[in-house]
Image (tube, helix red, strand yellow):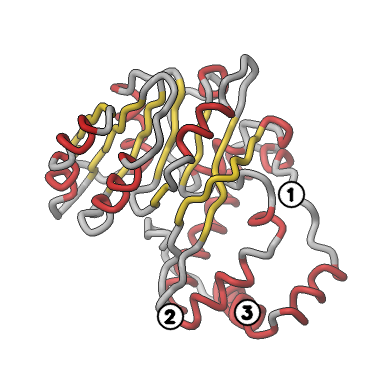
Amino acid sequence: MLSVIIPASNEAGYIGACLTALFASAAVPGGAEAVVVANGCRDATADVARGFAEVAAQAGWGLVVLDLAKGSKPGALNAGDAVATGELRAYLDADVQVSPDLMAQLVDALQRQHPTYASGTPVIPRAKSAVTRAYARFWQRLPFAQSPAPGYGLFAVNATGRARWGEFPGIISDDTFVRLQFLPEERVGCPAPYLWPMIEGFAPLVKVRRRQDAGVREIDEAYPGLLEREGKPPLGMETLIGLILRDPVGFAVYAAVSLNVRLKRGSTAWTRGR
């Protein structure tokens, strides 16, 4: 059975589309359940999720909705894990929309004895902001985004894979922490896509990028050597020049965001990736 754990903090405007797409999935071998963990919400996230009980039942899915007073993504992930019943676990951001075949493909990829990590093919939908469109266009061509199963917004593990760590630690980059529990050859990229929106506007991009960079530094300090498992291809000068020539506007926006992150100090408090 597959348990899909969805941490959600003030996601009333997004959780409906997320669950609609999830419950429209093709039949999942062994069955599936969704565990929505509203945490620290000041909106109707939990109520919106509960409103999908009938849709879930008609689709053959179980649905559990938790409503935690404290806002904490690691706390929400741990609370979801505590009540989930599936031996296979997927962790899905509340603003992500999966395609119909993805859940079944993840289950198929995880049907092996050795520890396995799997994700789908992320697609960034067209942003409203020209700045975000340019940044996303260039970012998607970088080695990390091109690597198999980068897992941002959605990742899944089998039982032996989940046994590699205990509770989710109180760190920024939970997705990076989990991905690096697995060697590159233990990660499986499924062809089915999912939509992962990117945040709109220059200043929000800088804020999110600053937090992402802080998350990587935090992992490097707390878990020495873990980043060596990344396994992404290097970004050589020849490749970089080719990317710049192919998309000079995208490079200019990406470089400007990166420069602002390095030159200006700012908060690394939680913010949405979109």
Task: Give the quadrant of residue 187.
Answer: top right
User: Label 3: how many residues lie within 10 Å, few (<14), some (14-19) or many (20+)?
Assistant: many
When the figure is inspected, residue 236 is found, relative to residue 160, above or below; the finding is below
Residue in front for this viewpoint, 147 or 75 = 147
Residue type indicated by callout 1: Lys
Residue at 47% x, 44% y is 154
Judged left or right of residue 72, residue 160 is right
Residue at 41% x, 73% y is 200
* Residue at disc 1, secondary structure: loop
The answer to whether mark 2 and mark 3 are in CB contact below 8 A is: no
Image coordinates for residue 263, horizontal then vertical, percent: 58, 76
Residue at 50% x, 39% y is 155
Reading the image, the residue beneath label 2 is 129
Quadrant of the frame with the N terminus? top left
Residue in front for this viewpoint, 105 or 79 = 105
Judged left or right of residue 27, residue 265 is right
Residue type indicated by callout 3: Gly
Alpha-carbon span between mark 2 and mark 1: 29 Å
Judged left or right of residue 169, residue 229 is right
Reading the image, the residue beneath label 1 is 232
Alpha-carbon span between mark 1 and mark 3: 21 Å
Tag nearer the camera, 2 or 1: 2
Residue type indicated by callout 2: Ser
Image coordinates for residue 96, horizontal then vertical, percent: 39, 52
When the figure is inspected, residue 234 is found, relative to residue 151, above or below; the finding is below
Earlier-in-chain disc, 2 versus 3: 2
Reading the image, the residue beneath label 3 is 250
